[in-house]
Amino acid sequence: MTTTKTRMGMEAEISSDRTGEPAILDGAIVIGAGAAGLAVAYALIEAGIATEILEREGRLAEPWHRRHDNLHLNTHRDLSTLPGVSFPKGTPAFPHRSAVIRLFNDFAQTHRLPIAFGVVVREIEFRGDHWLVNTSSGSRAARHVVVATGRDRQPFIPAWKGMKDFSGKVIHSADFGRASDYAGKKVLVVGAGNSGFDALNHLSGVETGQMWLAARNGPSLLPKRIGKVAVHRFSPVMARLPARLADAVMAATQRLAFGDLRKYGLPPAPSGGASRLGSDYTAIAAD
């Protein structure tokens, strides 16, 4: 017998029927207990919908636990909270990964979210009026399933030609480690997105050997601050603007902050930062 949560902490029990098939939860199963999974589960429970969260890891925010020690959010703390839970007083404007981990756990505990840890989802099958979810701990059935596993869950390195014969190390940004590990070494950073510039910002404080940036296109790049004002604070206003106008504002800000990036060998971006964010979810890098 399993227990799921509904509005106001009420519990709904779900047991197997006499045929051995799992009884159908007249509610939702949320797969993944990251920021999106936790937030949608909270919203469902607040709406009175019985909800169960399945998380393959043994604790919350596992990807954040694995990232390098200097990792910070590039979004402002006031715009990076979860419903009913904020970062504690004194948290830096761009919170350290440890603060993000703490926020996730505070949110789950505050709202007593029903999370089943260590449950791997293997298959989801539609059965006409419900979904059958095959997991490492048995099958579950529910009227609705929300997949919130995230598009960046698995680090990906392309199979570049000649990689097997390369004598150096090829490291994904998820395994960046400490910037000091790269002291005295030649470094090529591939990609001019958030992760690429995060690595570059840390590497710039270390006496590395020669360093390069390889980018398919020029970046959409903004400073974290102009003076003492965090640029990300303006994002709610920018989100209300037409994409073309937001593109123009971002391009002007980038030019004022960094000058013409073509002098570094970087061509103009194929489209504006707001347009790329809306079309293919390419995030705007912060430097």
Image (cartoon, grey):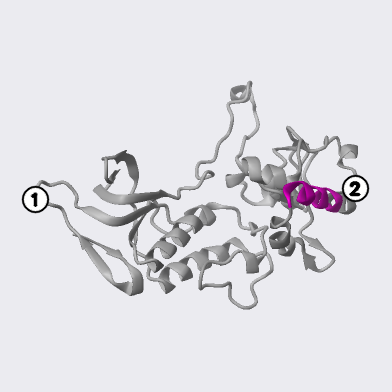
| The disc label shown at residue 259, or none | 2
Residue 215 higher or lower than 91, as above or below: above
Q: Is residue 151 visible?
A: yes
Q: Which segment is the magenta one? A: 242-253
Give amino acid for label 1: Arg
Residue 103 versus residue 208: which sits nearer the camera? Answer: 103
Q: Earlier in the sequence, mark 2 or mark 1?
A: 1
- At numbered mark 1, what does the secondary structure look like: helix, strand or loop? loop
- Closest to the camera, between mark 2 and mark 1, is 1
Q: Is residue 204 visible?
A: no
Position in image of residue 136 (x %, y %): 28, 45
Residue 283 versus residue 180: which sits nearer the camera? Answer: 283
At x 40% / y 68%, what residue is drawn?
A: 46
At x 73% / y 51%, what residue is drawn?
A: 242
Asked whether the residues under the numbered discs 2 and 1 touch, taking CB atoms below 8 Å apart as contact, a structural biologist would say: no
Q: What is the crowding at mark 1: few (fewer than 14 residues within 10 Å), some, or many (at least 20)?
A: few
Magenta stretch encompasses residue 34: no
Position in image of residue 264 (x %, y %): 87, 38
Give amino acid for label 2: Gly
- Horizontally, is 141 left or right of 17 in the view? right
Q: Which residue carries the number 1 mark? A: 18
Magenta stretch encompasses residue 249: yes
Dividing the image into 4 quarters, which one contains the N terminus?
A: bottom left
Q: What is the crowding at mark 2: few (fewer than 14 residues within 10 Å), some, or many (at least 20)?
A: few
**Magenta span main SS:** helix
Q: CA distance from mark 2 to mark 1?
A: 71 Å
